[in-house]
């Protein structure tokens, strides 16, 4: 008799954003006349930067002729893209990362979900609360947690991110082995200073732990004093892995391209105390389970690093930032405490009521979709997240409707 991985039975019924999509679909079936405005999942709405589109087209044409056709690409991604990333995203900011430490992939979601395969099942995992659900769910699937009780899984060390600590948790009192951090943060929009991040790096070194740093939203950092990468922090190369994505900064949510940085010094140990480089293990894992991102997509991503591409990405970010400002203004005018939205595309709002009730209220009374904070963890209860990814017109319309419904 075939049996299942029973860890899956510990998971909540469905993935947060699938659950929301189903609720919205049900609402839309009952109310077909309402033009629902979606400010839930952070999905971009603007077309790709023209520089990326041009490179994309050219690469597609290359695929048509035998002489310029590309089959399987190099496992880690094409050198042209990895070089552009190393220089522009890291070396220019003083972070010593080289092209051979970069692994191109089809998404930070997959990478941040898959990376835990490299670690033993009985390690202690520290995860912020609230949190992007992928980190937690993938550790549940792998059997690193107990059952779900009172809003939390057993065996996980939760790092509470609350108003009191500005949604930036400090290292825990107890030793942990694997630490997930995301800045600018999804869902709270909070940011971390270099000093704050240095504390985490020091903690990881003292505990022989590894930090998984999700920097998918770094393009939204407005404050020039904030670090964009954990590798701008001294000592991070030995203890950190970073995830980046072209989804939000270059509009690639549907195009799919991201990368993971695993420095050559970063290591973990086996049971007998021998050290192993995570770079080799991740390379081994990807070589077996992943066949790369298509050549045209990697060429489109490379084009983002041209002067023209960089300017177009800045324009994209500025476009969504304007939306964030408009959302913040209205929600504050309505008397809500709001966080994020300055160095991040998400606005985290203290709704002063159950977050699913607030979700239903906005959907039913305003035809606007948000994300209930409780879906990101126990500390998210009472909050909602509004995404700034949409057109200016839709944001304006959504805010008018919210004002009318709640004002
Ligand atoms: C979100 O809305 O939290 C993100 O868009 C989800 C994702 O990037 O997978």
Image (cartoon, rainbow, N blue to C red):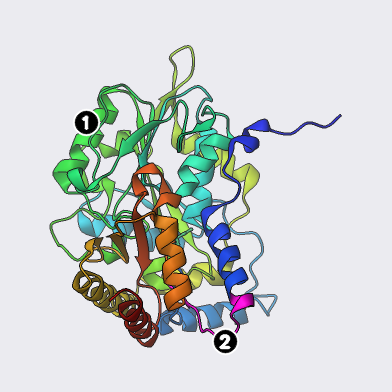
- In the rendered image, residue 58 lying in the magenta stretch gets the answer no
Q: Residues within 10 Å of mark 2 (few under 14, many from 20)?
A: few
Q: Residue furthest top?
A: 272
Residue at the spot x=57%, y=87% of the render?
33
Quadrant of residue 296 in the image? Answer: bottom right
Q: CA distance from mark 1 to mark 2?
A: 56 Å
Q: Which residues are magenta?
A: 28-42
Q: Does the magenta portion include 35?
A: yes
**In this view of the protein, which residue sits in the foreground, 138 or 293?**
138
What label does residue 33 carry, if any?
2
Q: Position of residue 21 (x, y in %)?
A: 57, 65
Q: Are marks 1 and 2 in contact (CB under 8 Å)?
A: no
Q: Is mark 2 within 8 Å of ligand 1?
A: no
Depth check, front residue: 55 or 68: 55
Q: Which residue is mark 1?
A: 202
Q: Say which residue appears at 28% left-offset and 66% top-offset.
A: 220
């Amino acid at each position: 008799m075939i049996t299942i991985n029973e860890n899956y039975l510990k998971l909540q019924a469905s993935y947060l954003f699938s659950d929301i999509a189903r609720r919205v679909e049900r609402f839309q079936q009952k109310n077909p006349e309402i033009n629902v405005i979606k400010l839930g999942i952070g999905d971009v709405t603007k077309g790709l930067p023209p520089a990326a589109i041009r490179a994309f087209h050219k690469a597609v044409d290359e695929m048509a002729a035998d002489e310029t056709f590309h089959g399987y690409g190099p496992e880690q991604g094409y050198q042209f893209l990895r070089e552009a990333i190393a220089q522009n995203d890291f070396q220019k900011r003083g972070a010593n990362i080289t092209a051979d430490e970069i692994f191109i992939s089809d998404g930070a979601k997959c990478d941040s979900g898959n990376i835990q395969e490299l670690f033993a099942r009985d390690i202690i995992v520290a995860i912020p609360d609230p949190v992007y659900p992928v980190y937690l769910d993938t550790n549940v699937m792998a059997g690193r947690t107990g059952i779900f009780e009172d809003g939390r899984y057993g065996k996980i060390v939760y790092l509470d991110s609350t108003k009191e600590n500005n949604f930036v948790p400090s290292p825990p009192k107890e030793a942990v082995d694997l630490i997930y951090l995301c800045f600018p943060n999804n869902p709270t929009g909070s940011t971390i200073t270099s000093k704050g991040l240095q504390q985490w790096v020091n903690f990881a070194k003292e505990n022989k732990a590894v930090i998984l740093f999700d920097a998918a939203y770094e393009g939204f950092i407005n404050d020039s004093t904030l670090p964009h990468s954990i590798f701008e922090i001294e000592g991070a190369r030995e203890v950190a892995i970073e995830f980046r994505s072209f989804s939000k900064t270059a509009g690639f949510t549907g195009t799919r391209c991201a990368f993971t940085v695993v420095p050559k010094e970063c290591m973990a140990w086996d049971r007998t105390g021998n050290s192993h480089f995570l770079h080799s293990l991740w390379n081994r894992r990807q070589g077996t389970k992943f066949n790369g991102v298509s050549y045209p997509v990697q060429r489109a991503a490379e084009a983002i690093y041209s002067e023209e591409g960089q300017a177009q990405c800045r324009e994209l970010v500025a476009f969504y930032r304007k939306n964030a400002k408009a959302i913040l203004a209205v929600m504050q005018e309505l008397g809500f405490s709001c966080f994020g939205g300055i160095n991040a595309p998400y606005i985290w709002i203290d709704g002063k009521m159950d977050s699913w009730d607030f979700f239903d209220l906005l959907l039913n009374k305003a035809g606007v979709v948000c994300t209930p904070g409780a879906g990101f963890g126990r500390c998210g209860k009472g909050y909602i997240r509004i995404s700034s990814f949409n057109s200016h017109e839709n944001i304006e319309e959504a805010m008018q409707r919210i004002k009318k419904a709640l004002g």
